[in-house]
Image: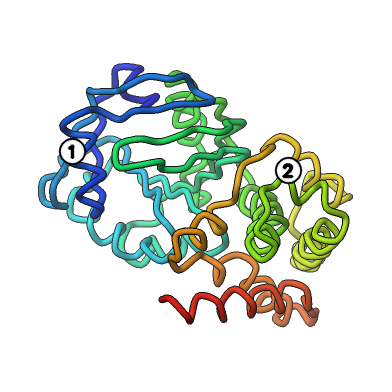
Amino acid sequence: ALFADAGEEVWIFDPWEAHTAAIEHNGLNISGASGDRCVKSIRIAQSGSELPEADLFIIATKASAIDDAAQLIAPKLSTSAKVLTIQNGLGAGERVSEFINEQQIYIGVAEGFGAKVIAPGCVHHTAMNKIRIGAYNPSSIAHIEPLAKQWSQAGFNAQAYPDIEQLIWEKFICNVAYSAPCTVFNLSVKQLLSDSHASMVSQQCAREAWQVAKAKKINLSFEDPIEYVTAFGLKVGDAKPSMLLDHIAKRRSEISAINGRVPVVAEEMGLDAPFNKVLAAVILSREKNWC
């Protein structure tokens, strides 16, 4: 919506036909942090073949849909086109690179950026802090500043990050702190921070992910994971993590790419992650009943 408001030609493809039909006929209705408005200039592709060639493709899907999205846009890519993938968890860049030249892949991290779909064609925007952008391949680092500038000109607080591992892990630790804990306890971020028992579990999940990052020698910008994720949570406020929203709607979540990923990487580093292992098991058990 912000890119369209800034005068860019914006196309959307989404297999949720009711949502795209509502946007096509009535515009995208937005409320919340970025202003209440209806954006009518967004164009809809009914299939992947209808997507035009573009300067920038943004993959903003759940982790489970990354492969399908990358395959969909691969035939549309010119040699100068950029692909920016924005997901929670680890491994998105690697999965996109199975279908797309890694020199065209960029990693985006949405920090403190909450939103939810209220109804087809209607979204509520709860928060917007920063979009952080890095290059998947080191040879493409020179392009991240112009890409971040493009986002800034559209109204985002965007920043280029040359260290992609720092970019990914700092967001990952925040995801780990709130995704599974909020989902298991059925609490918003604000409610979790006010609950000493749930907050303790959240902090231990974050600490386990931080310990793994330190073992991998990730160049984190902070030394106190509890202070870091608490500050992040206070910015998010009363937002509900997308994992909790998935469970409210009885959809399969991204647990395997977030909290469920911590024990896997911990084991590779000779560590253990019992809090994340237990919460991931609880969530997977719940999902088995409806997915």
Horizontally, is 90 left or right of 31 in the view? right
Q: Position of residue 8 (x, y in %)?
A: 29, 23
Give the numbered dot on residue 44. 1
Q: Up-down: is 144 above or below 92?
A: above
Disc 2 marks a residue whose amino acid type is Lys
Q: Position of residue 223 (x, y in %)?
A: 88, 50
Residue at 51% in and 59% down: 248
User: How many marks overall?
Assistant: 2
Q: Secondary structure at mark 2?
A: helix
Residue positioned 64% across, 77% down in the render: 282
28 relative to 37, above or below? below
Question: How many residues crowd around disc 1 within 10 Å: few (fewer than 14), some, or many (20 or more)?
Answer: some
Is residue 288 among what the camera can see? Answer: yes
Q: CA distance from mark 1 to mark 2?
A: 36 Å
Q: Residue at x 37, y 49 (%)?
A: 59
Quarter the N terminus occupies: top left
Q: Tell me the residue that label 2 is attached to.
A: 190
Residue 195 in the image, given as x and y percentages of width and height: 83, 53
The residue nearer to you, when weighing 212 against 137, is 212
Left or right of 18: which side holds 168? right
Three-letter amino acid code of the residue under disc 1: Ile
Residue 214 visible: no
